[in-house]
Image: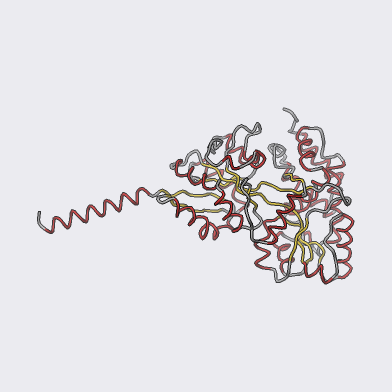
Amino acid sequence: MNSLLKTILLATTVLASAGAASAADVTLNIESWRNDDLAIWKEKLIPAFEAKNPGIKLTFSPTAPTEYNASLNAKLDAGSAGDIITCRPFDASLELFNKKQLVDLTSLSGMSNFSPVAKAAWSTDDGKSTFCVPMASVIHGFIYNKDAFDQLKIAVPKTNEEFYAALDKIKADGTFIPLAMGTKDLWEAATMGYQNIGPNYWKGEDGRKALIEGKQKLTDPEWVKPYEELAKWKPYLGDGFEAQTYADSQNLFTLGRAAIFPAGSWEIALFTSQAQFKMGAFPPPVLKAGETGYISDHPDIGVGLNTKSKHPEEAKKFLTWVASPEFAEIYANSLPGFFSLNSSPVKMADPMAQEFVSWREKYKPTVRSTYQILSRGTPNLENETWVESANVINGTDTPAVAAEKLQKGLDSWYKPGK
């Protein structure tokens, strides 16, 4: 064999080997609404997984949060969705599972790292099948400007009476807007208003389950009272709050123009990076000193497997890693304010994240009242709660009228026990 032929054969062999290696690499595409997390996936999560799983590559492809559900549904129906589906909690993902667009992950290795409560947001109503790996929850409360509180000599409020006394003092001084919240985007009023303070009135899970079972109605005092409280917030919001967007509220607070932000823990990373003042957080004030307090500790994000994935085994390797303590540690510290649902304890470095999660020791957790079962029909209770929460604060509906509208809409399609 002459040298030229040997060279050709050698080159062919090398190219063939390279082609085989390249062909062995599998790329998994991750669908998500968390476009804010793109850098964290690229810089931390993806490198950590790929380092231990040669031959499997990950691509994180987020869609704008408000467009995600519609976009994902269209892609799933067309067969063009990614391998890994980031899962909204409760009904939206359950619908995908019922349509056989998400794989049953009940027996996935690592699923034992999660309690039944942690898995509930991504399980069937009977709890027999789980279709997404739980990733994180978010906790509601209030983030406040510590410098403002120190300047005005205000103690962190623990009761409703102390809360309104603080708001009155902030308003009387005039330096700061007492509460940074607007009603234009609707969901802000419901999520950071009604669902934030409401559990203290309907007693968390007891009330939520009673509503599902038909033992309570939205017109009952424990469901109307939170709206009565929201109506009291109006004088403490900034001028023109009716036209104020969620982003406007964030800016008012981080620029130091407002003293208190009705919040979800997901604000922590953004606020820490932007605010030039010291911050703290407090849970929803209880009605009276010594009463049991409740917090919305809401499962927010999970990940599932597209039934039409061409790489199910590699995808399951990734999902098993998501179920691991290693992922929980990286994720919780990369995204302070998104708290791991893994049973393994996670040590967090961020002080405000530590503050939020410490409430789990003293307060009873619950989830948003509209997310499970009650928003499966039309009108959608979650979306209608957005509207009525804004209406109550704006003063266009009384609390009683808002409650009547919501219950009437629910009664039109929901029959408890059926």
Q: Nearer the viewer, residue 353 or 75?
A: 353
21 left or right of 265? left
Residue 90 against residue 18 in the figure, above or below: above
Q: Nearer the viewer, residue 346 or 293?
A: 346
Q: Quadrant of the C terminus?
A: top right
Residue ranking furthest to the top:
418
Q: Residue at x 17, y 58 (%)?
A: 7
Residue 8 against residue 341 in the figure, above or below: below
Q: Residue at x 65, y 67 (%)?
A: 273
Q: Quadrant of residue 347?
A: bottom right
Question: How far across and down, in percent of the image, does residue 384 sit?
Answer: 75, 45
351 left or right of 293? left
Q: Residue at x 67, y 40 (%)?
A: 117
Residue ranking furthest to the left:
2
350 left or right of 396? left
Question: How far across and down, in percent of the image, does residue 96 sit?
Answer: 58, 38
Q: Nearer the viewer, residue 348 or 31?
A: 348
What coloring was used for the rendering?
A: secondary structure
Question: How far across and down, in percent of the image, does residue 87 sit?
Answer: 59, 45
Question: How far across and down, in percent of the image, does residue 325 sit?
Answer: 57, 49
Q: Quadrant of residue 243?
A: bottom right
Say how many tags the image has.
0
